[in-house]
């Protein structure tokens, strides 16, 4: 997997999968078109996460995008690190995720080569598709975190203790959104 090149020895890992009754090609296309933040739960969690910034810096208030796709995430700062079209895409962020505001560093490719700078953490997130023995497609997401030093690792682990369940829920709902997108495309084709 391409993710190995960016986080071979992570400090934290989270993996989620879902089976989808559609060909791999259709699932991979749906990754790019599905509204990944259409769930009210995701919208609520994203609003909570942005609350400290809104309170401390009301003039910087941003209006959330109506539809959040992979491209929207890339445009918002998730750097696209690698892609094997039709199989896997890898995105990344660097920052001090444990901070309530000012927690992300602008994307720079060099932050994903070699060691993570002290005081920072590297988050690498992939989405992969593969055909199952039953003829369905297995859509998987894996998130890996690598911290730059022991102090950052300690801060991240304290943060992750509280955030991990919500982070996992967001990823599960995103996978379901892709499945729903595939089902909508299939039902649209049947109706035509």
Image (spheres, rainbow, N blue to C red):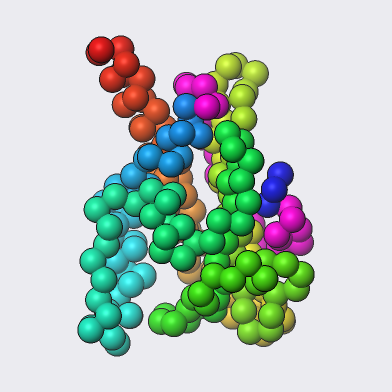
Figure disc tally? 0
Does residue 42 lie above or below 189 as drawn? below
Residue 178, given in percent of the width and then of the height, sits at 41, 37
142 horizontally vs 149: left or right: left
Residue 11 seen in the current view: no
57 horizontally vs 69: left or right: left
Position of the C terminus, as image quadrant, is top left
The answer to if 107 sits in the magenta stretch is no
Q: Furthest residue to the bottom?
A: 56
Does residue 56 lie above or below 167 as drawn? below
Camera-side residue of 121 and 153? 121
Does residue 162 lie above or below 34 as drawn? below
Where are the magenta residues, as a range? 4-25
The answer to if 13 sits in the magenta stretch is yes
Position of the N terminus, as image quadrant, is top right
Quadrant location of residue 145?
Answer: bottom right
Residue 44, given in percent of the width and then of the height, sits at 28, 60
Residue at image x 61%, y 46%? Answer: 83
Camera-side residue of 27 and 99? 27
Residue 59, given in percent of the width and then of the height, sits at 23, 84
128 horizontally vs 8: left or right: left
Residue at image x 39%, y 28%? Answer: 182
Residue at image x 25%, y 76%? Answer: 61
154 horizontally vs 32: left or right: right
Residue 115 seen in the current view: yes
Residue 123, given in percent of the width and then of the height, sits at 59, 64
């Amino acid at each position: 997997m391409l993710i190995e090149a960016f986080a071979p020895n992570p400090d934290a890992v989270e993996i989620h999968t879902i089976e989808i009754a559609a060909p791999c090609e259709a699932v991979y296309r749906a990754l790019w078109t599905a509204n990944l933040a259409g769930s009210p739960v995701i919208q609520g969690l994203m609003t909570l996460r942005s609350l400290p910034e809104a309170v401390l810096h009301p003039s910087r208030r941003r209006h959330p995008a109506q539809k959040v796709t992979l491209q929207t995430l890339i445009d918002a700062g998730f750097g696209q690190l690698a892609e094997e079209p039709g199989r896997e895409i890898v995105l990344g962020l660097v920052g001090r995720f444990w901070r309530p505001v000012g927690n992300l560093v602008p994307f720079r490719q060099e932050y994903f080569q070699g060691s993570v700078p002290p005081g920072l953490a590297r988050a690498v997130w992939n989405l992969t598709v593969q055909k199952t023995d039953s003829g369905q497609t297995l859509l998987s997401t894996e998130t890996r975190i690598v911290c730059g030093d022991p102090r950052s690792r300690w801060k991240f682990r304290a943060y992750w203790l509280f955030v991990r369940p919500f982070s996992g829920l967001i990823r599960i709902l995103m996978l379901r959104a892709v499945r729903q997108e595939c089902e909508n495309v299939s039902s649209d084709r049947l109706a035509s």
